Amino acid sequence: MAEASDIALLREFAGQNSEAAFAELAQRHIHLVYSVALRFTGNSGDAEDVTQAVFILLARKAAGLSPRTVLAGWLYETTRHTASRLLRAQIRREAREREASMQTILDEPGDNNLWSQLAPHLEAAMSRLGERDRTLLALRFYENKTGSETAALLGIREAAARKRTARALEKLRSFFVKRGIKSTGAVIAGAISANSIQTAPAVLAKMATAAAMTRGVTASGPVLALAKGVLKAMAWAKMKFACGVGAAVLLAGSLITVAVTDKKPEQPNPVTLLKGVAAAREGIKSGEMEFLVARHDPKWNIQTNYSLLKVAFDGEMRRFEQLERESAYVSTDPNAQKLVDAKRIELNGDDDALARMGLIRFQDAHYRTVYYGKALVRFDSRLDTTIDDPTKGSFTYIFDPRTFGLADNLPIGSPIEDFLGYRTAQSVALVGKEIVDGIEAWHIRVQVSDTWRYEFWIDANHPTHVIKEESPNVGTTILAKFDHQNPNDPLPVEIDEMQHFGGDPRPWETRMFRQNTRYNVPIEPKAFTLAGLDMPIGTPVVDVRIERRIGYWNGKGFSENLPRTALPRQENQISTLQNNLASLEKAKTDGSFVDERRIVWHRVELVIGAMVLISIGLSLIRRFKLFQK
């Protein structure tokens, strides 16, 4: 247990509710949390309450923390916010009273005189630093990690960690100089390292663990209230930020992206980054994988379409097997579609209700498609097999799996470089480093032409991972998630694609989950032939390119007439998807694939914008009346 990393212990606690794992985390970091809380509050009792509240918050947030989270930094930031909230809720103590209390509580080894001057101002000085610098100093001097240990936890080079430490200490020194405390950065570092951590009461770790295991139920009233207050404050902070952005969008008429940019001079070449992504994907020469696909049309809030895909590929040859449930009109009346669509609008897109009324029926759609460069061969178990020109596209899935997550439109024969755009682009620019879903990423802009561009965000720590892609010209955004337990895998395990057409705020949304994957394995050549389509004997084969039937499949080739051994076709099979719901659970979203909160939030944005515009209008009217007077 003692050798396990913080993240490993967090996963064990989140997955198994392991008290031993949480107790180990509490024992490791209790002194850090208690010391920061003590400097903020100046009172040992209040510091204990803050400490328990912080570990309750850790228990509640454990499952959602990113694998890249540096726990010491997260605890430091959470302690600052929690202690600040406690102080705001209390009657303000006089500054000198708090300093006097601090001096009687703190241990005073080393340079006592300097530390007694630094201590009352240390957390205020730390608050002036960026979050990453605070995390670095917390690891380096609060938890006394070595330079190499700190660099490893932050995922940076040791030399870079030393430079950032020196810059952060210089900022602290400047802060203290303005308050009449003069010293060097090295002496300040020594004083902080020797005195910043106070030993927490022995029983506090057990109390914090016990409170956290019950998510605060067994904690005292003030501690539980404090934890709940911080949770609400976090949620409210996100809401206020969203409100501000929404109002700005409506007034300015454009999206404003708030980015945290890394200003370090060591910036990579953007073309080199994109080439690295392409090379990693091109290293996959063959393979097998399965996809679960869920698609939602915003016109129908209830209906979501699901597909199961099984893919085999070897070079440019690929075979897709696609299974999904489709609906068909029961009536053959020419006006049936118009009547059913009107009823569908009335029922808000509830196809299950339409089926119960007997207006439509569900049936399996089972397609097998083979592509081998010059032709596209598709077998539909209900109809026939067609041979078509691949340049015309396909209504079934038939993309290169190695391009998964790079674009919304996946042409069949295009090389991977074309999806990244850098080969023929007018310009490729590195915008900077930004935070995407908690991950540091390099933002790259590829200007393909005067009217077309791509935006890519590449994981700074895993430069083969494209975690976000935007095509502003068509209103498409793709967010990708990768397998953090297998960082060398260049393909995402999940993507969420949102498309906005014609300014409609409701997105057409597609989620794809990759599973059961094997790379660079031999694929049976038969898979890419007509025999590999597993057509029943007697299946008609039509060459669409010359618009004629070329025969009936006889098991080896074509017959001019229907073979006597042909099997009768089965119609209206019970949906295989209905019998395989377990595989769809992770794609289900309680009735609607699109998160309805997005639609509700858009309406809130409209209301806020209308209120702002009305306020501006009334203000202008009042000024106009005053001017007339």
Image (cartoon, rainbow, N blue to C red):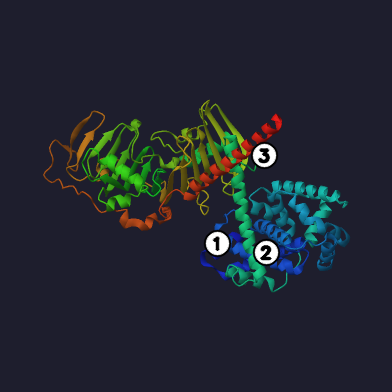
Residue ID for mark 2: 29
Looking at the image, the residue that sits furthest to the bottom is 203
- For label 1, the SS is helix
Residue ID for mark 3: 266
* Type of amino acid under label 1: Arg
Say the numbered circle drawn on residue 296: none
Location of residue 583 in the rendering, given as x and y in whole percent from the top left corner: 38, 56
* Mark 1 crowdedness (10 Å alpha carbons): few <14, some 14-19, many ≥20: many
| Real-space Cα separation, disc 2 to disc 3, in angstroms | 33 Å
Observer-nearest of 140 and 366: 366
- Looking at marks 2 and 1 on the same chain, the residue that comes earlier in the sequence is marked by 1
Mark 2 and mark 1 in contact? Answer it, CB < 8 Å: no
Mark 1 and mark 3 in contact? Answer it, CB < 8 Å: no
- For label 3, the SS is loop
Mark 1 or 3: in front is: 1
- Looking at marks 2 and 3 on the same chain, the residue that comes earlier in the sequence is marked by 2
Looking at the image, the residue that sits furthest to the front is 629
Which quadrant of the rendered structure holds the C terminus?
top right
Q: In the displayed structure, does residue 301 sit left or right of residue 528?
A: right
Location of residue 573 in the rendering, given as x and y in whole percent from the top left corner: 24, 52
Observer-nearest of 81 and 25: 81
* Mark 3 crowdedness (10 Å alpha carbons): few <14, some 14-19, many ≥20: few
* Mark 2 crowdedness (10 Å alpha carbons): few <14, some 14-19, many ≥20: some
Residue ID for mark 1: 11
Location of residue 596 in the rendering, given as x and y in whole percent from the top left corner: 47, 49
* Type of amino acid under label 3: Glu
Whether residue 455 is visible: yes
**Among the 4 quarters of the image, the one containing residue 97:** bottom right
